[in-house]
Amino acid sequence: MKKIEATIKPAEVREVRDALGELGILGMTVSSVEGFGRKSGQTRVYRGTQYPVCALPGAKIELVVTDSRAQAAVSAIAKAARIVEIGDGNIFISTVEDAFRIRTEERGDKAL
């Protein structure tokens, strides 16, 4: 199993959710986050005063999929979230050792 964590622009969450839904991937966690990368050091103007922006708003999507669906999920996220601008986001993929569904006590792929 693979855990996919994608940090994207908040406006792209619906498109990513729909793209994953077309693959039959319906379960995911979406969180509001703030952060910076290459876009740090920006300034914004508020009421005529310029001030530095330390962190920009984002959305973090987390999901766990079977190994066989991981590449399709990553491709769907990348295609749906891509605006071709700095700050489009990142996708991280890691291996999940086990999964456990509390309600049914199923383990592994069956818990997904």
Image (cartoon, rainbow, N blue to C red):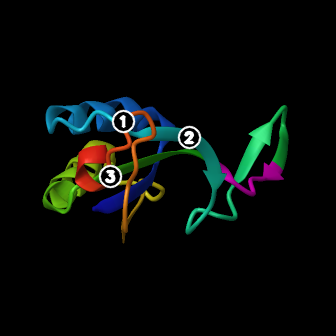
What residue span does the magenta drawing correspond to? 51-56
Q: Is residue 1 left or right of residue 71?
A: right
Task: Relative to 29, say whether 79 is above or below.
Answer: below
Residue found 37% across the figure and 62% down from its top: 98
Q: Determine the residue positioned at 27% across, 42% down.
A: 80
Position of 16 compared to 29: left or right?
left
Image-based side of 55 in relation to 27, left or right = right
Residue topped by disc 1: 104
Are the two marked residues, 1 and 3, in contact with CB atoms closer than 8 angstroms?
no
Q: Are marks 1 and 2 in contact (CB under 8 Å)?
A: no
First in sequence, mark 2 or 3: give its number: 2
Which residue lies under the disc numbered 2? 31
- Which sits in the foreground, 110 or 10? 110
Q: Residue 69's mark?
A: none
Q: Residues within 10 Å of mark 3 (few under 14, many from 20)?
A: few
Q: Earlier in the sequence, mark 1 or mark 2?
A: 2
The amino acid sitting under disc 2 is Ser
Res 101 → quadrant: top left
Residue 8 locus on image (x, y percent): 45, 48
* Numbered circles on residues, count: 3
Residue 52, magenta (yes or no): yes
